[in-house]
Image (cartoon, rainbow, N blue to C red):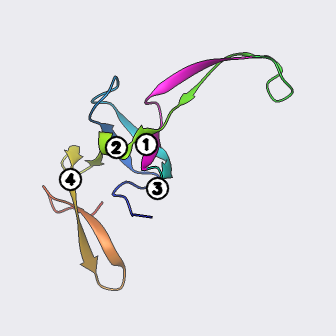
Amino acid sequence: MRSMHIRKGDTVVLISGKDRGKKGKVLKVDTSRRRVVVEGLNRAKKHMRPSQRNPQGGVVDWELPIDVSNVMLFCPGCERPVRINRVRKGGKGFVRVCRKCDREI
């Protein structure tokens, strides 16, 4: 498995698709399929029949996965989507750093 520049809990900006320009928090990362689930973005609705798990039934909506190439990491220092560098820090290993403001993310 390859490592990805996006991790769970990161704030990202969608750069393509119907929700382009919106920000959200990463809820789930699937490294094998290179997809991320972002809170509040790429939502879909499904009509559910009543069952034991969902006795009421009705319309349920949730977030669908997005390809990792369609999101960019949001830098709180620059307050915009940015690319990152990986810099080796002492005993911590690699740290993600903003390419614009050199702030650790």
Mark 4 Cα shell of 10 Å, populated few (<14), some (14-19), many (≥20) = some
> Of circles 3 and 1, which is in front?
3
Asked whether, in this view, residue 83 is left or right of residue 68, the answer is left
Q: State the CA–CA distance, disc 2 to disc 1.
A: 6 Å
The label number, if any, that marks residue 83 in the structure image: 4
For the C terminus, give its image quadrant. Answer: bottom left
Mark 3 Cα shell of 10 Å, populated few (<14), some (14-19), many (≥20) = some
Q: Main secondary structure of the magenta part?
A: strand
Judged from the image, the secondary structure of the residue bearing numbered disc 1 is: strand
**Nearer-the-camera pick, 78 or 66:** 66
Question: Residue 94's image quarter?
Answer: bottom left
Residue labelled with disc 3 = 31
Mark with earlier residue (3, 2): 2
The residue located at (49%, 26%) in the rendering is: 43
> Of circles 3 and 2, which is in front?
3
Q: Mark 2 near mark 1, Cβ–Cβ under 8 Å?
A: yes
Q: Is residue 40 magenta?
A: yes
**Nearer-the-camera pick, 65 or 62:** 65
